Image: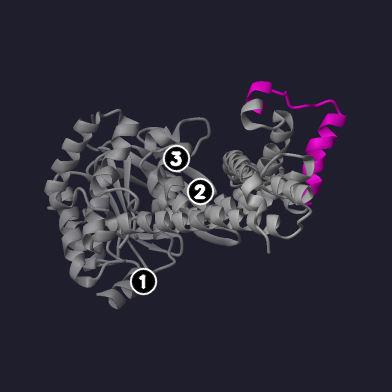
Amino acid sequence: MNAHEQLIQTIDLRKHFGSLEVLRGISTSFEKGDVAVIIGPSGSGKSTFLRCLNLLETPTSGQVIFEGVDITRAGHDLDLHRRKMGMVFQLFNLFPHMTVLDNITLAPIKLRGLSKEEAENRAMELLKRVGLTDKALVHPAKLSGGQKQRIAIVRALAMQPDVMLFDEPTSALDPEMVGEVLEVMRDLAAEGMTMIVVTHEMRFAREVGKRILFMDGGLIAEEGPPEKVFGAPENQRTREFLRKVL
Amino acid sequence: MNFAFLNKYWQFYLVGAKNTILLAALAVIIGTAIGLFLSLLKLSSRKPLRFIASAYIEFIRGTPLLVQLFIIYYGLQAVGIRFPDIPWIGAILGINFSDFMSGVITLGLNSGAYVAEIFRAGIQAVDKGQMEAARSLGMPHRMAMQHIIIPQAIRNILPALGNEFVVVIKESSIVSIIGIGELMYKADTIRGNTFQPFEPLLVAALIYFLMTYPLSKLLAYIERRMHSGERS
């Protein structure tokens, strides 16, 4: 496999909510091993764009090409592709009626055909990595926000995805819990996981991001390596945004 | 007040109560199955399916149960549809099985419409993020419903569903009109035999209450237990 193989490509992606045009034609691509951080003001379409990548949001027009397949085209099994795209949500969305372990093992058992034992062993390994093995048998309601989000990351990783999508993973957390989640994401990036992250954490974007995409008004206004986007932004809107948030 | 008739007729009440419970239990099973099915139709993305479910629910809720009972009991016979009479079951129950089924099916069809709305509301009350999380893992819609949405919806549904069970027990008294020997019918028989209009019905009312009240309490207890196990 080519190291610079394109994992996800979008072509002129557009999304309307009624008369509101949230995405106004986004064409970009993400390579294997990419750590792309999407920043921008609220309402710029960041989350919608991310959610279009695994078609949780159906684009009004345009294409999403994942591992060489146009998944926006009708007549193929979208679920098979989604299994290779892990997603982490702002509000965690853990399954409250199941233990942490069941949260993690349900999809691998049902969808990847792992035995219960195999899935649980792998889940425990992943829990060890995020330091939460002691929480395996509790229900999510007993966890702190930071713990929930680390479990949510593990749940997505348990499917062994080719890419991880993060939709503002720390926005709903108390400030003292942001660090523990970013730490896990940092480790993940260091291991070479392909990641696309929508976040307001500028320090994380600068330190961990290999590529920054600045979105504004439903378009990618500027993109480049963090040194360039943070250090010498070309776009007027990028400069204004960074002045406000930094 | 004179309750001396109980010495002679207590077994009537026993049989009647047994038949009422049987009638209500079967009706509730049918009603829950129909209700779940209708609620899924109603939440479908396909318009014709939603329309069928809505039409059914609105019709049932907009017409009297007595009229529905007569349509099933007399109407279906008139057009040549008759529930088969299975004598040995009838003998065990001490009633005409074919008539009994008319009652069960009417109550079940009726309850199904109400249960459908209970299920729909319960399913829609589950956080949207749950379905998204399940789909993002690659679960097909049906699997997500089965493992993620419906188990959580049950918790929203249980109180209202329990209440529906209680309602069915009470409303089952209406099938006494077509001669099914349930509690109300038996009480009426005793009333006719003893020429006492008041006391036999009081006893029937008490027996209905003794069925519904513990049931509500039991459901409240189950509901509390479900919550304490997984929340807080």
At a point 47% along the width and 48% down the height, the residue shown is: A12
From the image, which quarter does the C terminus of chain B lie in? bottom left
Residue A104 x %, y % = 26, 43
In three-dimensional space, the C-alpha distance between marks 3 and 1, rounded to whole angstroms, equals: 50 Å
Question: Which residue lies at the image location 43% right of the left edge and 37% below the top edge?
Answer: B143
- A192 and B192: which is toward the camera: B192
Q: Position of residue B224 (x, y in %)?
A: 38, 59
Q: Which mark is residue A59?
A: 2
Look at mark 3 in the image and give the residue it sits on: B146
Q: Quadrant of residue A66?
A: top left
Name the quadrant containing residue B146: top left
Name the chain letter of the residue that bears numbered label 2: A
Task: Report the mark closest to the observer, 3 or 1.
Answer: 3
Specify the farthest residue to the right. Answer: B78
On the picture, is A50 further left or further right than B25?
Answer: left
Give residue A21's position: percent from left, percent from top: 54, 60
- Above-or-below relation of B95 to A195: above
Q: Are marks 3 and 1 in contact (CB under 8 Å)?
A: no
* Amino acid type of the residue tagged 3 in the rendering: Gln
- Residues rendered magenta in the picture: B63-90
Q: Residue B82 versus residue A114: which sits nearer the camera?
A: B82
**Which residue occupies 37% across, 70% down?**
A237
Q: Amino acid at mark 2?
A: Pro
Tell me the residue that label 1 is attached to. Answer: A236
